[in-house]
Image: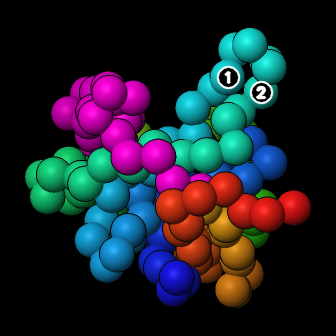
Amino acid sequence: MAWERVYTINDFWDRPRLGIANVAGVPHIYQSPFDSAHDDFADHYLVRQVDPDLLELVLEDWAIWMRWSEAFDQGLASTESHPALPADRVRHDELQIRIGSRLSVDPAAGRKVWGQFRNIKRGWDGFEVEWRNEPPLD
């Protein structure tokens, strides 16, 4: 398997849980389902190819969040403005409406894979992922 580009990390809990990344070179939504029986996230991901129009919207919203994150790291934004700077707030809210619940993977339609993420440079935009069709051997 090869390391692939991670475009966004829209949810993070110990590791990326939801976002968009390449799978075999093609942008897909990845989602780590929550296993309520174990009160934790599953050890696998569900993936499905992302529609180009949704990809465009999510990438625009990611850029808005990245601007906020950079400003926050520099002490120029507070948690009260999260996840968008005041200048981006209206557009972020519009994007959230247009994205709606589409940034998810229906368990009946998703393909089950295991992913290992790594950060190759400082910051949220430096992640890569390697997908496997079987769970890793521990």
Residue where numbered disc 2 is placed? 40
Amino acid bearing label 1: Asp
Q: Secondary structure at mark 2?
A: strand
Q: Residue 24: x, y in percent?
A: 34, 75
Q: Residue 94: x, y in percent?
A: 25, 34
Number of other residues with Cα within 10 Å of mark 1, as a class: few under 14, some 14 to 19, many 20 or more:
few
Total numbered badges shown on the rendered structure: 2
Q: Are marks 1 and 2 in contact (CB under 8 Å)?
A: yes
Q: Residue at point 70% right, 77% down?
A: 119
Range drawn in magenta = 90-114
Query: Colour scheme of this structure image?
Result: rainbow
4 vs 107, nearest the viewer = 107
Left or right, residue 30 beside residue 130: left
100 vs 116, nearest the viewer = 116
Q: Residue furthest top?
A: 37
Residue 138 vs 111, above or below: the answer is below
Left or right, residue 85 beside residue 119: left
Q: Quadrant of residue 116?
A: bottom right
The answer for how far apart the CA atoms under marks 1 and 2 are is 5 Å
Q: Residue 129: x, y in percent?
A: 57, 72
Number of other residues with Cα within 10 Å of mark 2, as a class: few under 14, some 14 to 19, many 20 or more:
few
Amino acid bearing label 2: Asp
Q: Residue at point 24% right, 52% down?
A: 50
Q: Residue 9: x, y in percent?
A: 54, 55
- Is 108 part of what is drawn in magenta? yes
Q: Residue at point 33% right, 58% down?
A: 28
67 vs 96, nearest the viewer = 96
98 vs 26, nearest the viewer = 26
Residue where numbered disc 1 is placed? 35
Q: Residue 103, can we see it?
A: no
Instruction: Give the mark, 1 or 2, whose residue is nearer the N terminus.
Output: 1
